[in-house]
Amino acid sequence: MGLFDIFKKKTKERSLVPTAQEALLKQTATIPDSEKKYYQPDSYYKAKSHDGTPFESEVVSFEQRKNTSIPSNNGLYVPEILMLHFCKKYPNPKGGYPGYWWYKYGIRDVGSVYESLVDRGFLIINDKTGKYELTNLGKTELEENAYVPYMHRHSKYTTFTVWDLNQLLGTGNKSNYMEIIEKKHADIDNGNEDSNKSFMKELKVIDPEGYRLLKSQDKQIKAVQATDEKYAEDKDIDWIINFWEEIWKDGGPKFEGSGWMFRLPDLYIKAKRYDDAIAIVQKIKKTKGSYYSNKANSYITKIEERRAKEATKKIK
């Protein structure tokens, strides 16, 4: 087989892998009706994360990840290993399936992957608790790949991910993962710090006001990212509402993007705090310019409809 034939074969293999949108539709269709109550509404899951914001990015489906990541010695990929770590919460999770299974790991139908881990001998159902528990094979798998849950818990470094570490560790012994992580983080920190210091030093001289704005934007963006990651895990809506209320006490988001500008109204709606939702939308309309006017008007209509619907339910 010539070089051109190999290239054609690789290109054909990639074209057979579903895109994020195709994977999303396919996996959504396989979720049993009895399981749907453990997921967010279908509208929550999109092919892009943080759509319409400065953080917008295409979701990479699990099938796509398989083409670029390295399986463990027992044939498991990163998300499957993480599922072993969290197995005691499932099936029938009390707080539902967190959104990170789709947005971080490309898996929409979480239940089916757990079932496949049972079929492959990594998990069993505990008759007393009704939850999954590790088999000896599952315990060994988790011990040999401890880097996966570690990176999930310490995911603040967006430029160095569990997928990058997976490539660096390869197929051999992975017990040195902390050494690799620490070196990589040091390299990233030093590189970012040097380039950022140089840029900010020049900006401070050229445009003092722009310097102050950019510094405050950077600080707020980091806080928003960290908060969003925490909420994806613990689903504490009161806590995240309080965070966004503090943001608005300081004038609201310091960066553009309708997704973030209307984040607090969305949270108020989710918590059924309709009066608060209308108040903040009106504030957006008044203080954030005509760019958001149409969206603000549609939000007010939507909120009033929701509020009327809730009032009707109470009367019945």
Image: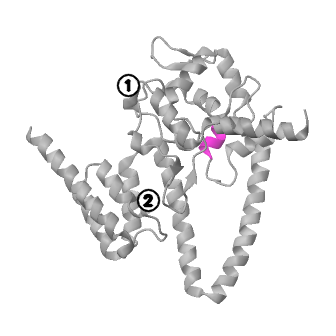
Residue picked out by circle 2: 259
Q: Residue at x 41, y 64 (%)?
A: 261
Q: Amino acid at mark 2?
A: Gly
Q: Which residues are magenta?
A: 149-154
Residue 33 is tagged as 1
Query: How far, Cα to Cα, is label 2 from label 1?
Result: 30 Å
Residue 134 shown in magenta: no
> Which quadrant of the view contains residue 151?
top right
Q: Please, which residue is most extreme toward the top here?
A: 127
Q: Please, which residue is most extreme toward the right here?
A: 2
Q: In the picture provided, is 119 more to the left or to the right than 36?
A: right
Quarter the C terminus occupies = top left
> Which quadrant of the view contains residue 164?
top right
Q: Amino acid at mark 1?
A: Asp
Q: Residue at x 58, y 29 (%)?
A: 83
Query: Against 202, is 86 above or below?
Result: above
Q: In the picture provided, is 182 more to the left or to the right than 84?
A: right
Residue 148 seen in the figure: no
User: Depth check: 141 or 41 in front?
Assistant: 41
Q: Residue at x 52, y 20 (%)?
A: 132
